[in-house]
Amino acid sequence: MTIEPSERVDRVGPSGIRRFFELAEEVDDLISLGVGEPDFSAPWTARQAAIDSLERGKTSYTANRGKRELRAAIAADLARYDLTYDPDDEIVVTTGVSEALDLAHRALVDPGDTVAVVDPSYVSYVANATFVGADVLRVPTRDDEFVLTRSSLEAAGAADADVLLMGYPNNPTGATMTRDQLEPVAAFAREHDLTVFSDEIYAELTYGHDHVSIAALPGMRERTIVLNGFSKAFAMTGLRLGYAVGPPAAIDAMNRIHQYTMLSAPTTAQYAAIEALDSCADAVTEMRDQYDRRRRVVLSRFDEMNIDCFRSSGAFYAFPESPWDDCEAFAEALIEAEQVAMVPGTAFGPGGTDNLRVSYATDMESLREALDRVERFVEAFPTEEAFEADR
């Protein structure tokens, strides 16, 4: 007997990011600009809170929705984005934003529904929609500086969709959306009765302006699920803690699945998160300032190399155009020749075909060295044909 994967799983290939990481792992002296993970550790007081919770023997389950103290802290923190949620029935704490995204799909999307997905976008978006049997409709953004517009939604046919799945600040492009840019998108969602899943995991990481949540716009709170967490701003990726906020009926449905699958998010991580929200704002600001300095260095260096690079304003990604026609070939050759890893834009959908995702969540010395290597490589091999001829 051979056990076969379900048809839905079979429709989703391996993650383009993961495949590339496995390739890079075989290379010595590698500098990775591919990982979407802070190079900082979680603030010390947050780590200390986690340690203290273990020493006090706090190793049991929490409430399914998460500790009440944490939900209250999340609600208070969201007020700075003009978002107001009841900790008792409008918040569920999850095992990372990845689980929150999965719950949103399983609880609120039926087989045959259509999920409109911003393109390019994080690799999990299309996969989650596919896993629940939804049809995926990609909304191209390349011609609009990687932001959603009303015209792009109309042209893609999103008026007939059931859900709009968006993520700003955006992974992989680093694009952000202002209130003026979000308002026509919100109007479109209201007019066509779309539910919105808004992944705002990079909300803390914007440069030169504050983050705006689409849920804060008139008429959007009741149709939006906001997904967020502690991985990026607080450098707590390994603690796996996220959350979702939204209308009570939606959160109740998500929690019903959560209580049968995860029971509750990791208890130790919840203690760390309470402390992070309570006392780690300065650490977040310091990390954000570091990212901004690196961002400006990366953009400047690509300018010097005459490589067009999108002027990112959020997250910790740059999105330069690939010097070669084939971004995957370029990325693989760069690893082979100079031991520098970037992620081909093809991993993030058709809209990323001509680009590379460059993470600047690495220390400045390594970043400068990696960019020196890229410059040397591009000067030596301006085309794929030149590289192949030299092999």
Image (cartoon, rainbow, N blue to C red):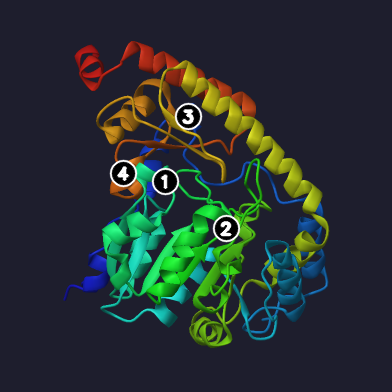
Q: Which residue does the numbered mark 3 point to in the structure image?
A: 30
Q: Amino acid at mark 4?
A: Thr
190 and 300: which is toward the camera: 190
Could you tell which of marks 1 and 2 lies nearer the N-terminus? 1
Could you tell which of marks 2 and 4 lies nearer the N-terminus? 2
How many residues crowd mark 1 within 10 Å: few (<14), some (14–19), many (20+)?
Answer: many
- The N terminus lies in which quarter of the figure? bottom left
How many residues crowd mark 2 within 10 Å: few (<14), some (14–19), many (20+)?
Answer: many
Residue 376 visible to the viewer: yes
Marks 3 and 2, how far apart in space? Answer: 28 Å
Marks 1 and 2, how far apart in space? Answer: 18 Å
Marks 2 and 4, how far apart in space? Answer: 22 Å
Q: Which residue does the numbered mark 1 point to in the structure image?
A: 146
Which label number is shown at residue 201?
A: 2
Marks 1 and 4, how far apart in space? Answer: 15 Å
How many residues crowd mark 4 within 10 Å: few (<14), some (14–19), many (20+)?
Answer: many
Disc 2 and disc 4 in contact, CB within 8 angstroms: no
Q: Residue at x 61, y 31 (%)?
A: 294
Q: Residue at x 55, y 82 (%)?
A: 251
Q: Amino acid at mark 1?
A: Phe
Q: Which residue does the numbered mark 4 point to in the structure image?
A: 346
Marks 1 and 3, how far apart in space? Answer: 30 Å
Left or right: where 235 falls relative to 144 = right
